[in-house]
Amino acid sequence: MVATPMQRFLRWSQRLLFVTGILALGYVGFTLLDAHLYEVSAKRSLETQIQMRKEPQAVRPNPAIKRGDVLGRLDIPRLGLSVAVLQGTGSRMLRLGTGHIETTPLPGEAGNSGIAGHRDTFFRGLKNIRKDDEIHFQTATDLFRYEVDWVKIVEPDDISVLAPSTDSTLTLVTCYPFYFVGPAPTRFVVRAHRY
């Protein structure tokens, strides 16, 4: 029996959709693998920097921080969250880790340090964060400890959560709701103080 034009069209449509689906899954898989491999590399690099700092050497000035540099590692022990923090919040940086919001002080310094991350990758675990949880920020030279003060949901244009502070605080920002498909309508914000 000879296939009708409609049957041929449906058969080719099925094949096209199948190939498109395979390519989309491949892209997602590659992106997740790339981010995971970068995380492993960034953490290894940070550990090497920490070990080098422990060895006695002549005092050297710290090099200037550039976009994309690894600043440290953010850990939330209760959640099992551990992620590299890069300088900047460009799309590549946020695909590979979390990003320090450049208009804010560096973590550990006086002021309100902002860290942004994607809700569907590195900051997915923030959905379970609670008041008084510990947050650690490890750099090559120091370990800074923070304690969560509050969590709230704000509008995307509400930048008051990044307002300057005289104390050393850390503000984590991600999109919300966590399982929303498409551009999220609000932001999930965690504020912690250094202790």
Image (cartoon, rainbow, N blue to C red):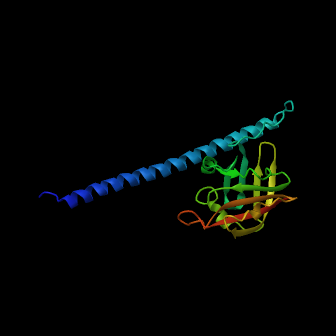
Rendered image quadrant of residue 123: bottom right
Residue 133 visible here: no
Instruction: Residue 119: give x, y in percent of width and height.
Output: 61, 60
Asked if residue 25 lies left or right of residue 4, the reply is right
| Residue 30 drawn at (x, y percent) | 50, 47
Residue at the image point whose x is 84% and y is 51% from the top: 109
In the picture shown, does residue 117 fall above or below 131?
above
Residue at the extreme left: 1
Instruction: Please identify the residue farthest to the top as the structure is shown.
Output: 58
x, y percent for residue 111? 84, 56
Quadrant of the rendering where the C terminus is positioned? bottom right
Residue 112 falls in image quadrant: bottom right
- 91 and 54: which is toward the camera: 91
At x 77% / y 60%, what residue is drawn? 162
Q: Position of residue 144 (x, y in %)?
A: 81, 52
Of residues 52 and 97, which is closer to you in this image? 97
* Residue under the image location 13 percent in, 57 percent down: 2
Q: Is residue 1 left or right of residue 168?
A: left
Question: Is residue 153 toward the left or the right of residue 57 in the image?
Answer: left
92 versus 8 height, above or below: above
- Please report the residue visible at 59 percent of the width from the left and 65 percent of the height from the top: 184
